[in-house]
Image: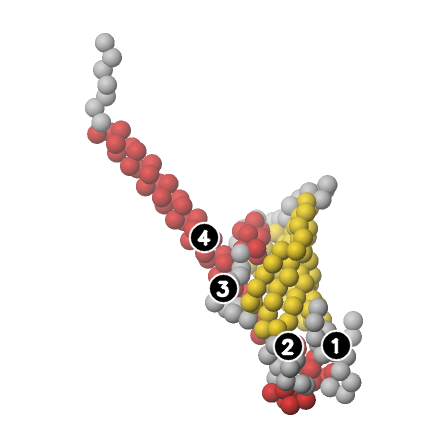
């Protein structure tokens, strides 16, 4: 695919299973307010135990000021994203592919992400992210692609913060659950210590 290309690799200190859960729970979050809705269109488990999913996301689509003077004012301000994903429990991997289904001639963004659990470091997950930005607008494709790449970079920073936010919420929920369980266990022990034992004659 012609156009601009983006590539990054990031290691985060969280087990793959936690990252997988956070991936499904990352919206809404305060860093991705441009994501308006998410809907599951399709989901199934294959015979080889892989989870296939297709989701539809709606995001805001604010044009740069120079583009607002060129393109009609009734151009939709929302963009619809299809996201396909495959979860492979055996290999501890999650692969997602996302692309916009409207405004594709103006700008098409295809994003591929791989979340891979590291074998030698079980509490670490490697995230590999690639994106391709292209435009079919004659005479303006280059500035549109530059704009698209810059916006993608900015949104990916927000996406990582949103994922970290989801991970933090999961850790807090886990700590609260463990804390409640420990307190309940403590109360049960305290009750058993103060209660007089029954005598059977």
Q: Which mark is residue 171?
A: 4
Marks 4 and 1 sit apart, C-alpha to C-alpha, by: 42 Å
Q: CA distance from mark 2 to mark 3?
A: 24 Å
x and y, in percent, of residue 186 in the image: 30, 37
Nearer-N-terminus badge (4/3): 3
Residue 13, percent across and down?
52, 56
Q: Return the disc, 4 or 2, that comes first in the chain's sequence.
A: 2
Q: Residue shown at 69%/66% (left/top)?
A: 99
Task: State the CA–CA distance, disc 3 to disc 1.
Answer: 30 Å
Do we see residue 151 in this rendering?
no
- Give the mark nearer the N terminus: 2 vs 1: 2
Residue contact between numbered discs 4 and 1, judged by CB atoms under 8 Å:
no
* Label 4–label 3 contact, CB within 8 A: no
Q: Earlier in the sequence, mark 4 or mark 1?
A: 1
What number of labels is visible?
4
As displayed, is residue 175 above or below residue 148? Answer: above
On screen, residue 11 versus residue 98, left or right, reads: left
Residue receiving disc 1:
105
Cα–Cα gap, marks 2 and 1: 13 Å
Residue placed most toward the observer, 109 or 68 = 68
Q: Which residue is mark 2?
A: 76
Quadrant occupied by the C terminus: top left
Report how far apart the C-alphas of labels 4 and 2 lie in the structure: 39 Å
Front position in the image: 124 or 46: 46
Q: Which of the two discs, 4 and 3, sits closer to the camera?
A: 3
């Amino acid at each position: 695919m012609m156009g601009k290309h983006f590539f990054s690799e990031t290691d985060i200190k969280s087990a793959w299973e936690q990252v997988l859960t956070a991936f499904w729970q990352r919206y809404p979050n305060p860093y991705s307010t441009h994501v308006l809705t998410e809907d599951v269109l399709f989901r199934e488990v294959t015979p080889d135990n892989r989870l296939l999913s297709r989701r539809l996301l709606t995001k805001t689509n604010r044009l740069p000021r120079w583009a607002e003077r060129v393109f009609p004012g009734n151009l939709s301000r929302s963009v619809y994203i299809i996201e396909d994903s495959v979860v492979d429990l055996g290999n501890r991997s999650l692969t997602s592919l996302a692309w916009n289904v409207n405004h594709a001639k103006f700008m098409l963004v295809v994003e591929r992400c791989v979340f891979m659990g590291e074998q030698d470091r079980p509490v670490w997950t490697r995230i590999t992210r690639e994106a391709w930005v292209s435009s079919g607008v004659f005479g303006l494709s280059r500035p549109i692609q530059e704009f698209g790449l810059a916006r993608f970079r900015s949104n990916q920073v927000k996406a990582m913060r949103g994922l970290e936010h989801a991970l933090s919420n999961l850790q807090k929920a886990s700590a609260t659950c463990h804390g409640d369980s420990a307190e309940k266990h403590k109360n049960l022990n305290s009750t058993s210590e103060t209660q007089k034992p029954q005598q059977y004659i």
